[in-house]
Amino acid sequence: MMRQYELVERVQKYKADANEALLNKAYVYAMQKHGQQKRASGDPYISHPLEVAAILTDMHLDESTIAVALLHDTIEDTSATRQEIDELFGEDIGRLVEGLTKLKKLDLVSKKAKQAENLRKLLLAISDDVRVLLVKLADRLHNMRTLEHMRDDKRARISEETMEIYAPLAGRMGMQDMRDELEDLSFRYTNPEAYETVTRKLEGLSLRNEGLITKIEDELRDLLVRSGLKNAKVKGRQKKPYSVFRKMQSKSLSFEQLSDVYGFRIIVDDTADCYRALGIVHTRWRVVPGRFKDYISTPKQNDYRSIHTTIVGPSRQRIELQIRTLRMHEIAEQGIAAHALYKDGENDGDLLSPESNAYSWLRHTIEALADGDNAEEFLEHTKLELFQDQVFCFTPKGKLIALPRGATPIDFAYAVHTNIGDTCVGAKINGSIMPLVTRLSNGDEVEIIRSGVQVPPAAWEEIVVTGKARAAIRRATRMAIRKQYAGLGHRILERTFERAGKVFTREVLKPVLHRLGQRDVEDAIAQVGRGEMSSLDVLRAVYPDYQDERVTVKPANDEGWFNMPSAVGMMFKLPGQGGDGEAKVNASAPADTLPLRGLSANVEVRFAPAGAVPGDRIVGIMDESEAGHALTIYPIQAAILQKYYDEPERWVDVRWDLDEANKSRFVARIMINALNEPGALADVAQVIAALDVNIRVLGMVRIATDFTEMAVDVEVWDLRQLNQLLAQLKELDCISTVSRSYD
C-alpha cells in the first residue's frame, strides 16, 4: 500500500510545485474516515482510493484531481459529508466528490430505459468537469483489476458494463492504454472460454518466436539510426487477447490465419522525422497494400495523431508500425489527460487546452440530449458511436468532417449542419453524382445538393449511422406529420366554427390553451386533426355559452294530422285527408276518432333497416304483421319505395313532431371505405365518440388488399349531428369515402 510520502513524491516528479499540504490533508482524511473498513479481498479499504490515485499519477494529473481520487468514496462509504469536505478542501473538490458519489449509484446495464437514462446522467456529469471522467475511469480500472474477489453474478454485470460503456468511452477520450486494459479485463469475465483459448495460443506463439520482438526492434532501430534518425526509439509488443479476438471476429479468421499479431511503435523527435522514418521503412521493406493511414495530416476527433503502416518486415513477418513524436505518443496513450495545461506552465484551473479536440465528441453527444429523443434512442445512438471507427471526408472548401465508418452523404450533410441535412436531395462524391446510400471512404470530397422544399423521408433513418442524423430525421418527420395534422385540424375547426356562426382564427385559441391542456396553438390544432380532441370541445372552450342546438322539425297544425302513442315524436296523415281532399276532417276532432281505415291507436310503428333521423323527409308504408297492421318509416330517398309506387293506399304521410325535451336517439346507417391499416377503425371510433354518437351495429367486409368497407349503424339525435359526423369522417387520412346508406 502506497505511503503518504510516496504519493507526494510521485506527484512532485512531474509537478515540482504541487500543493503538498493538500495531498497530505486528503491522504490523512481518507485514511481516518475509511478506518477499519475492508474490501471484498480482505485488504484495507483505503488501498482502493490509494490505487486510484496512483493510476492518476501515472497520467501526470494535478494535485486537485489526486485529492478527489483519495476522497471519492468518503461521502458514500463513511461518515463524511459534502459540507465537511467543502470546508476542508474547498467547494470545487467537494462538488467533484459528490458527483462521483452519484455516478457510483448508476446501473448502466439494467433495463433498457433505465440504462439509457443513467447513461445520460453519466455523460452530463462528465461534461460538467472532465476530472469526473478521469477519476471514474481510474476507479473502474482498479475495480476491474481486483474483480476476482467478487461474486460471479456481480463480476459478469460489472464486466459487461465496462465493456459496453467505460472501455469505449476511454477510447473516445483518446486513453488507448486504459481502454486496452479495461477491454482485456472485461473479456476475461464476459467470455472466459474465448479468453483462455486466445491467451493460450498467444503464449504458445511467444514461445515459438522467443526473441523475435527484440530482434525486429534492433533491426528497425539500426536502420533508422544509420539513415540519420539517431534519436529514434523502437518498442515492440504482442497484441492483447481482446484485440486479437476482435480481429478474428470482424475478419472471420482463425488464430492461425492472423498475420499481424505484432505491433511496433517508432518514436521520433518531430513531425518531419515521422515522414522521414516512413520513407526509410518503406524503402527497406515491402508495404502491405491498403494498410497505410496518415492520422498526422488528418487527426482523429480525440486528437490522436500517428502514421500507421503494415510491412512484411524482418524474418518475413508481417508487422504493424505506428510512427509518431513523443508528444503524439503521450496523447495517444493518455488522451485528454495529456492535455493538462500545467505541462505548458499555464495552469489556470482549466484542465484542457482551448485548442484541444479530445472533448469534442462528448460535447456533440451532450448536444443530442436537447433534441428531444427518448431515452432508448439516445442509448442506441451513443453506444453505436462509441464503438464505430471513423472515416474522414472533406467539404468542397476543404473542411474536414469526421464520421463513423459506414456513413453516407446524408450523415455528412447533417454533420455539417442540421438544415443542410433536412434540405439534402443529392450528393456529389469526388465530383460525380452518387446515390445518397453510398458509403463514404477516407478522403472523399462530398458536395451536398439541396432543395428548399425538401422534407427528409422517414426511410432515411434506416440508411444513416450517426445519432445526430437519426435524431434530426425523426424530429423533421415529427414536425412534417404535425404540420399535416395541423392543416387538417385547421380546416375542421373552420367548418365547426362556421356551422356555429363563428369565425375561427389562431388568435382565439391563445387565451384558452390552458383549458385545452396544450402548450401552444399549433399543438391544439394538430390534436384536432389527429382526432385526439373534438372540434366541439375547442368551440366550447372559446365560447363557453355556446349551445349545440339539435334540429327539431315542428309541423304546422294542419287539418288531418294525428299522433300515435306508439310513435312518439311523429305525426301521421292518411292519403286524401286534410288539405284539399274530399275526406277533409275537422281539425278539432280528437285524434282517435279519425277514420284510420281500420288502424287502432296502438298500431306498431317501426323504422326501415337503414333508419331515419329527425330532419329527414320521411314517409310511412303500411305492412301486414303477425300482430296485425304495422307502419314502416322510410327516408324519402330510400330506393325501396319504388316498389310501392303502384300501391298508394299503403302510403301514410309522416312528419316529425319533436319537442325540446325529447331525449330519443335515432338510427342511421353509414358506409365507410377505409384504408386497410392498423388504427383505422380506432380513428373512426374516436371521431364517432367525440361527437356524442353511439355505435349500435358495426360490420366490416374485406373488399380489397388495401381497403376495407364498413357498414356502421349509428344512433344520433338528428340530421345535423349526422351530417357533422359524415363531414369529420371525410377529413380522416385513413378514409377514402364515406356516405349515408338509405337501404
Image (tube, rainbow, N blue to C red):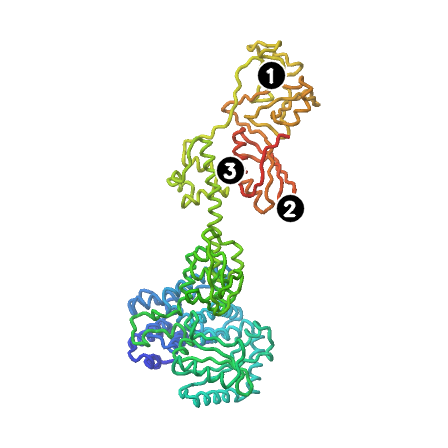
List the single residue furthest toward the front. Answer: 431
Q: Which of marks 3 and 2 is nearer the N terminus?
A: 3
What residue does disc 3 label? Answer: 690
Please, is residue 489 above or below residue 222 in the view? Answer: above
Q: Disc 2 and disc 1: Cα gap in Å?
A: 50 Å
Disc on res. 323: none
Taking depth in this image into account, of 636 and 101 the one nearest to the observer is 636
What residue does disc 1 label? Answer: 573
Q: Is residue 19 left or right of residue 295?
A: left
Question: Does the residue at mark 1 contact the one at mark 3 (Cβ under 8 Å)?
Answer: no
Question: Does the residue at mark 2 contact the one at mark 1 (Cβ under 8 Å)?
Answer: no
Judge the density around disc 3: few (<14), some (14-19), many (≥20) Cα neighbours within 10 Å. Answer: some
Residue 576 visible? yes
Q: Quadrant of the N terminus?
A: bottom left
Disc on res. 705: 2
Position of residue 337 measured from the top left corner of the image (x, y, whole percent): 38, 73
Q: Earlier in the sequence, mark 2 or mark 1?
A: 1
